[in-house]
């Protein structure tokens, strides 16, 4: 008997009241199964490097399974602190390179990488792979570039906040910056815990982060509601700062809030010195 015929038989042979009682459970299980098995396909939007070529040759570094991810290093001889940057969805290193230069000009060494499946990085993007990718980039930064963890700021934008918060909860670092980031993936769609699992549980992980945290969010964000930034700030341990960017959406925070960001980054680094 086919699945369709079996369902038809069940519906016709089961009393109406039992059918109506079971339909919500069936609907819930269907949604849960879809969320668990197919949400990652909807979550990532990998882009080719051909759409935005890099102006400098990237560095290829191996991951734990032998696939390589690409990384760029923008040194600043005057820098006291370095930034390990995780970009947003639908972006590559070539897309964010101008923004990386702006961060470099603020006085930082910059290390940034492409997730697996993005740009020239090999493999397939998954939640677990992004955790391994940022850990690989962190290992290269601290072991090969010899950058001390207490001089390393982890910066995640949008979906990049997921691996950034994960790393901050696992490894020694100087500080964490989250820009336009969600509390968790499913909370962007449904504001309450509908399913017993989630993707990128950033708010929950912040409880394990014990370094200065800076949350940046545009108050007109059309992709990830402003309330997510506020909730992340509430969940973070002190010392922490919240920087709302007036009239900024999801992708123009750095342009609209340029003056605010410069002042805030300077103040944020002063917090590191006070804690050391």
Image (cartoon, rainbow, N blue to C red):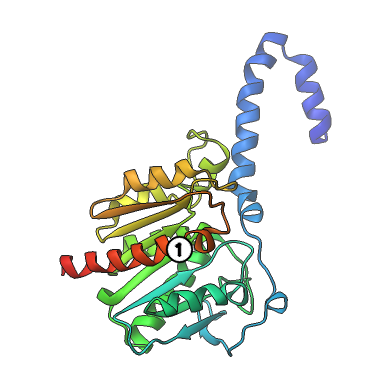
Q: How many marks?
A: 1
Asked if residue 130 shows in the view, the reply is yes
The picture places residue 118, in percent across and down from the top left corner, at 63, 71
| Quadrant of res 122 | bottom right
Q: Nearer the viewer, residue 82 or 258?
A: 258
Name which residue lies at 35% across and 64% down. 263
Q: Does 26 sit left or right of 229 as displayed?
A: right
- Residue 261 sits above or below residue 106 on the image: above
Q: In this orientation, which residue lies closer to the viewer: 217 or 18?
A: 217
Residue in front for this viewpoint, 166 or 26:
166
Above or below residue 113? Residue 232 is: above
Horizontal side of residue 228 vs 272, given as left or right: right
Horizontal and vertical percent for residue 264?
A: 34, 62
- Callout 1: 10 Å neighbours few (<14), some, many (20+)? many
- Looking at the image, which is closer to me, 168 or 266? 266
**If the image is split into quadrants, where does the C terminus sit?**
bottom left
- Quadrant of the rendered image containing residue 44: bottom right
Inspect this view and state whether residue 64 appears.
Answer: no
Residue found at x 51% / y 35%: 191
Residue in the image at 64% along x and 75% along y: 119
Q: Note whether 206 is above or below 255 in the view shown.
A: above
Q: Which residue is mark 1?
A: 156
- Secondary structure found at label 1: strand
**Drawn side of residue 181 relative to residue 238, left or right:** right
Percent across and percent down for residue 183 are 45, 47
Residue for point 67% across, 9% down: 17
225 in relation to 6, above or below: below
Q: Quadrant of the N terminus?
A: top right
x, y (%) of residue 182? 48, 49
């Amino acid at each position: 008997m086919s699945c369709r015929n079996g369902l038809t038989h069940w519906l016709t042979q089961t009393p109406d009241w039992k059918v109506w009682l079971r339909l919500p459970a069936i609907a819930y299980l269907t949604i849960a199964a879809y969320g668990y098995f197919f949400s990652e396909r909807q979550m990532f939007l990998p882009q080719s490097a051909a759409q935005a070529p890099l102006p400098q040759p990237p560095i290829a570094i191996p991951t734990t399974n032998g696939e390589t991810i690409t990384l760029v290093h923008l040194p600043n001889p005057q820098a006291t602190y370095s930034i390990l940057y995780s970009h947003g969805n639908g972006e590559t290193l070539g897309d964010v390179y101008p923004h990386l230069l702006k961060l470099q000009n603020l006085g930082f060494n910059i290390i940034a990488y492409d997730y697996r499946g993005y740009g020239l990085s090999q493999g397939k993007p998954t939640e677990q792979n992004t955790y391994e990718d940022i850990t690989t980039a962190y290992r290269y930064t601290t072991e090969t570039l010899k950058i001390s963890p207490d001089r390393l700021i982890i910066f995640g934008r949008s979906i990049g906040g997921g691996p950034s918060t994960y790393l901050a909860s696992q490894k020694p670092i100087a500080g964490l910056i989250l820009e336009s980031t969600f509390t968790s993936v499913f909370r962007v769609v449904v504001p309450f815990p509908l399913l017993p699992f989630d993707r990128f549980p950033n708010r929950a992980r912040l409880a394990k982060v014990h370094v200065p945290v800076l949350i940046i969010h545009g108050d007109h964000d059309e992709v990830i509601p402003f309330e997510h930034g506020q909730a992340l700030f509430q969940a973070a341990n002190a010392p922490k700062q919240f920087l709302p960017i007036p009239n900024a959406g999801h992708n123009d925070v750095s342009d609209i809030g340029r003056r605010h960001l410069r002042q805030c980054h300077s103040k944020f680094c002063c917090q590191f010195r006070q804690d050391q």
